[in-house]
Amino acid sequence: MSADILAGVKPAPTSDVETAAVLQRNHDGDLVTATEEENLQRGLHERHLSMLGIAGAIGTGLFLGLGQSVQTGGPLGALLGYATIGLVVCAVQFALGEVAALLPVTGAFVRHAEFLVDPAWGFAIGWNLVYGNILSIPSEITAICVLFEFWTDINPSVWIIIFIVLTTVVGLCFVRVFGEVEFWFALLKILLVVFLIILGLVINLGGIPGTERIGFRYWKNPGPFVEYIASGNWGKFLGYWSVMTSAVFSFAGVESIAMAAAETRNPQRAIPKACKNVFIRILVFYILAILIVGMLVRSDDERLNDQSGSAGQSPFVIAASAAGIPAIPSVVNAVVITSAWSASNQSLLAGTRVLYGLALKRQAPQIFLRTTSWGVPYVCVLFFTCFMFLSFMSLSNGAMTVFWWLVDLTAAGVLVSWSSILLNHIRLRLAMKKQGIPIERLPWHNSWTFYSSCVGLFMTLLILFTGGFRVFTKGNWDPVGFVSSYLDIPLVIAAYFIWKFVKKTKIVSLSDIPLHDAFKKSEEDHEVVS
């Protein structure tokens, strides 16, 4: 039976639950289930995937957050921090592309972890992603309410209801409709980024009447680095390091490309190409943007401390206002609103597909396996919709403070996810070597990616464990900051050992990973597509 399913033959279903439970292997670390192939529709095209990654990574972190990075690390410190994380993202994207092209399953690296590492690790990573995305959606809707206050005093509850309904409707649509919505939002954001970069260059070079050329003036005074917490070179290094940790969250979302792999046409070709293209575009956008911001705004500009969350704190808006261009704040605010909603759509897609994947493995209630006739896991979507109403906590200032603290708890989850992606790739390559399978058999491969994954894994773990370093410095202890930086670590570890104890799972031996079956299935699928 296992061989039949692996070859794509679907057994006759006896019931919904039994059909859902039919797996390719006799333990929890399997490949594609018959239910997954039957119920989910491949509606995403290559262009959708590329834009999904861009839509997830270009958001409030780019439009509003770059100024804080310049303020903390200085123009050069911020540039180096983003460049460093950009290289880590390169390792993550190429690792994800290689594994997902071979194993195009819903839930991507969560299911890869079950297959290549340990079913208990997949369980821990999966639920970590679910709760992170559950909190992410209402946080984005709350951000939308704050952004609308830039224009109007309409009761925020109106915007909350509107965007809960819009997000749910998009989530219930055929996945191709979702892909189209995100495609156009991503295109809008790309156009704004290009516009802001060009505008920044024009302002910097004195192209606006009545303004003078700035050049690299602010790299000299106040200077290329900012001394953060400590003084001297050590303080400058800490400024750089704090930028690098915040840059992680600006890049977060690029890993969502492969979450809907089972709903992607020709994933062996589409996923690798999307991973490569998204990495290049995102890196170029962020590096150019942080370079321009460091040239436009002084690192000690007090306007960067604006805590309103509106467009007023954007370094691009600060520079445009100084140059006498009053329309820019409204333009940026409008696109940031679409960015926030786009990010909530991304979280809904990623979270629901992971939850669906967990249900396939009986690691979540079987009711989450129910799908619409057009292949959308609607129970998962409605489950996430229930938590969107947490957005109403923003109507109370005290509750909003607590809410944002809860959202901060999920931040380290990005690094946990990246670490898992890199570990999956390392295990795949080691298993291939153990079983004598040449890397040329991979649908997509690069000779250097094993080494980049090793370095990337070291960096992600280092940043994860030092992300809250500020609370350990003299006079800066903050219990809330400590919890928000490190709570995710024990939660993931606890989930791993609980499932391991309950199900008696073991780390999969490199020689026991059924790669020959996986390669056979991948090559057969590739022949069908060709």
Image (cartoon, grey):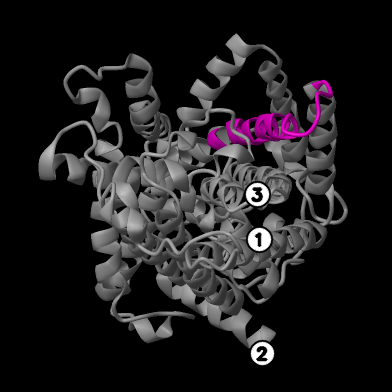
Q: Please tell me which of labels 1 and 3 falls first in the chain.
A: 1
> SS at mark 2?
loop
In the rendered image, which quarter is residue 162 located in? top right
Say few, some or many: other residues with alpha carbon within 10 Å of mark 2 (under 14 / 14 to 19 / 20 or more). Answer: few
> SS at mark 1?
helix
Quadrant placement of the N terminus: bottom right
Amino acid marked by disc 1: Leu
Of 287 and 526, the residue lying toward us: 287
> SS at mark 3?
helix
Per the rendered image, the range of residues in magenta is: 132-155
Determine the CA span between mark 1 and mark 3.
19 Å
Q: Is residue 108 left or right of residue 180?
A: left
* Residue 166 screen position, x and y as percent: 83, 41
Q: Tell which tag, 1 or 2, sits nearer the viewer.
A: 1
Say few, some or many: other residues with alpha carbon within 10 Å of mark 3 (under 14 / 14 to 19 / 20 or more). Answer: many
Of 3 and 317, the residue lying toward us: 317
Label the magenta part by its dominant secondary structure: helix
Question: Mark 1 = which residue?
Answer: 192
Query: Circles 2 and 3: CB distance less than 8 Å?
Result: no
* Residue 294 screen position, x and y as percent: 40, 55
* Residue 359 screen position, x and y as percent: 63, 41
Say few, some or many: other residues with alpha carbon within 10 Å of mark 1 (under 14 / 14 to 19 / 20 or more). Answer: some
Query: Circles 1 and 3: CB distance less than 8 Å?
Result: no
Is 1 in the magenta?
Answer: no
Q: Is residue 380 left or right of residue 302?
A: right
- Vertical arrangement, residue 181 with respect to residue 70, above or below: below
Q: Residue at x 32, y 22 (%)?
A: 482
Amino acid marked by disc 2: Ser
Of 434 and 79, the residue lying toward us: 79
Query: Circles 1 and 2: CB distance less than 8 Å?
Result: no
Question: Mark 2 = which residue?
Answer: 530
